[in-house]
Each structure stands twice: as structure tokens, then as C-alpha cells.
Amino acid sequence: MKKVQQHYDEVADIYDERYDGSRGKYYHGHISEHVMSELPKGGFLLDIGCGTGLFVQRYVAEGGRAFGLDISPGMVRHGRQRCPESGFCVGTADVLPFKDGTFDALASLLAFSYVPDPEGMLRECYRVLKPGGRIAVCTLSRTVFTSIVPIAYQVGEKVGLKKVGVGHFDEHYYTNSEIAGLFREAGFTDVSVGRCSFAHLNLADPVFNLARKVEPIVEEKLPYLAYNVCAAGKKPES
Ligand SMILES: C[S@@+](CC[C@H](N)C(=O)[O-])C[C@H]1O[C@@H](n2cnc3c(N)ncnc32)[C@H](O)[C@@H]1O
């Protein structure tokens, strides 16, 4: 975990450049849309692995209140700058410093694969949600394509590439049924897991535009080609 924290501290000042361009904006907007559609609007949200506060900002813009938690002090500093009206703290996903039943909504985008104890994280998410509250997690899923990502990132680290996500972090990618099992084990009901994302920001422009055009078809008809998973569930009313 220390290594993940150090990495994100190192890239914190350049992280937003990744999502400032049109491809990055589209990609992050797209996964945020999936997560948003699973959550109640206008409630109190906790975003785990909140990074520089992109989703905190989005949730607040749609009428809610939000709190961000991240293991990296550097990322949290940027989150505070982006959303001065929201609360942020440094912390780990599996030990949440909040009372039982604090939040209406819980989100985590592009961070779940780093968490070494996913059962512990989901147990804590369940605890801090109010009865009836909802959770949505978007993370890279396990596919033939994503299985090479950790290898590529390890090679990148060896050749000294300083880029967001490049390193050896023991990331874990889950299949749909594995992630659904983790959610149900934690106590969540109404569990749904759907693949999303086909247009990746690392694609060059003509290919990106094509991928973007066919993304809705891929998500609906060829989901095995999509590489993120958006998993959602509900804490029962009582
Ligand atoms: C790829 S970034 C995603 C940031 C943000 N959610 C977004 O969508 O831009 C992954 C983030 O997860 C955080 N992270 C990794 N492991 C964590 C853990 N165990 N607990 C809390 N945050 C963690 C990192 O510090 C980093 O900010």
C-alpha cells in the first residue's frame, strides 16, 4: 500500500492533465455517468480513492454533498483545491473513519483494483452506509485485454516511465461473478455488475473517435470487449 501511496503522491501534480484533454474528459465523464446512474442524487456521498476530487465535484454539481477519502496526501491536497466546500481526508479504504450509517451513497472509481483487502473495504462501506443507501464501484475488470496491463506497467516502471498508474502494485482485477460475490458477501442486495468503457483515453484520435462511436453497441451487445466493470448494490432498509 505504501508503494501505491508514494506513486500517487509523485504523480498528484500531473494527474489532472490525464483528464483535461477531450479524450480524458470523455473517458472520465463516461465512467462517472455509469456510477452516477447507480446512486441516489442529492444525498451525502463518500468517494473512496477520490484522487483529485473529479467525482466529488460531479456529485456536488448534481445537487449532493460529498466527502473524499484517499490514501495519498498529494491527491487529497488537489481534491481540497478543486472542491473547497467538500470534506477530504487521508485514509485507507478498509478502515473508514466514520460512524455507522453516515452516508446515502458510496462511490469508488478506478481505485478498487489497488485495495489489498476488498472484503474489508466492502464491509466498511456497508457499515458507513445508511439503510437503503447505495454503492457503485467502477474498476478495471479481468479480461484477456486487461491481463497484460500489469505486465505493461511493470515494464514501464523498469524503464523509468513516470506516468499515472505505471508501477508494480499487486493490482487485482475481478470477473463479473467475483465482484458480485464480494458485494453479496458484504451484505449488499440488488447487486448488478455491468461492463463499461471501450474508448480509452490512451487511444490516438481517429481510433478513439471510432471506439467512442461504437461504445454504446459494445456495452449493450458485446460487453466482453468492454474493460471496466461498474458494480452496484444496496444496503437493505433494515
Ligand atoms: C487511478 S486513481 C483514481 C482517482 C479518482 N477516483 C479518479 O477517478 O480520478 C486511484 C486512486 O486510488 C487511491 N488509492 C489506492 N489505494 C487506496 C486505498 N487502499 N485506500 C484509499 N485510496 C487508495 C490512489 O491514491 C489514487 O488516488
Image (tube, rainbow, N blue to C red):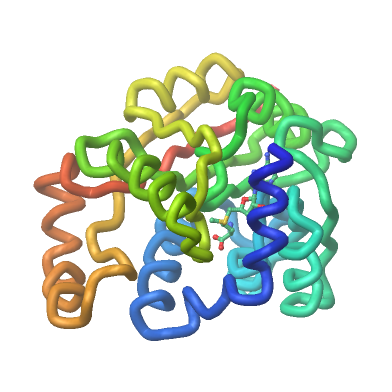
Please give the name of the residue rendered at 65% of the width and 58% of the height, measured from the top-left corner.
8
Q: Is residue 123 left or right of residue 161?
A: right
Q: Position of residue 10 (x, y in %)?
A: 68, 63
Q: Is residue 236 visible?
A: no
Outermost residue, bottom direction?
21
Outermost residue, front direction?
159
Please give the name of the residue rendered at 35% of the width and 38% of the height, measured from the top-left corner.
141
Q: Position of residue 156 (x, y in %)?
A: 41, 55
Which one is in front, 196 or 79? Answer: 79
Q: Is residue 85 above or below residue 22?
A: above
Please give the name of the residue rendered at 67% of the width and 30% of the height, measured from the top-left corner.
121
Q: Is residue 71 left or right of residue 135?
A: right
Q: Is residue 102 above or below residue 161?
A: above
Q: Is residue 82 left or right of residue 15?
A: right
Which quadrant holds residue 92? top right
Q: Where, quadrant-wise, is the N terminus in this rendering? A: top right
Q: Is residue 67 above or below residue 30?
A: above
Q: Is residue 37 left or right of residue 82?
A: left
